[in-house]
Amino acid sequence: STSGTGSFSPNDSALIVTYIPSSNDTTAGQVTLFLFSTDTGNCFSVKDSMKITFQSVPVVNAGNDVTVCANNDSISLNGSINGITNTGLWTSSGQGGFVPDSNSMNTSYLPDSADESNGSVVIKLTSTNNQTCPAITDSIIVTITPSPVVREGSDAYVCSNTPNHSLNGN
């Protein structure tokens, strides 16, 4: 039997069962299951119990997708993890690195030339220290646009009595 409102499959009389918690059980955060002896002859019935505690799965937020220029040497990351854990690990689809490290929620990603050539990188934040819950991942896409190119033209010599000089930049 149970202190909650869930059910047993195949039934509550079998010794090998699966307990299916109800939404009321998970909202309450725990339930106690009881096993009673039956057909004990002249002996008194005995029971044993176990408590099941329902833990909140981690809620992971890596932030929003972002577009940066290739001449931006650092991408600020401000992730958050709540619930059963508040720790996580940043990873990327690229070859850049994380500063100060990949375990800090507030860190920076330094793209490398391959990331810039690819035009984008996927950065993931995955929960760690999840106890019995599975790891949860959230990701952002960083789009990297090419750096602007500026050409002012060649150096020039002009006479001091005619100092105006035309520029042909592009």
Image (cartoon, helix red, strand yellow):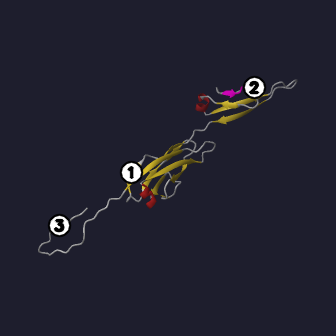
Residue shown at the point (69%, 28%) measured from the top left: 9
* 170 displayed left or right of 5: left
**Is residue 87 depicted above or below 6 in this figure?**
below
Magenta stretch: dominant secondary structure: strand
- Residue 13 is marked as 2
Disc 1 on helix, strand or loop? strand
Circles 3 and 1, Cβ within 8 Å, touching? The answer is no
- Along the viewing direction, whichever of 140 and 153 lies nearer the viewer: 153
Badge 2 crowding class, 10 Å Cα cut-off, few under 14, some 14 to 19, many 20 or more, is few
Q: Earlier in the sequence, mark 2 or mark 3?
A: 2
Q: Which stretch is magenta?
A: 7-11
Q: Which residue is mark 1?
A: 67
- Amino acid type, residue under disc 2 in the picture: Ser
Q: Quadrant of the C terminus?
A: bottom left
Which is closer to the viewer, label 2 or label 3? 3
**Is residue 32 depicted above or below 93 in this figure?**
above
Residue shown at the point (45%, 56%) measured from the top left: 108
Residue 51 falls in image quadrant: top right
Which is closer to the viewer, label 2 or label 1? 1
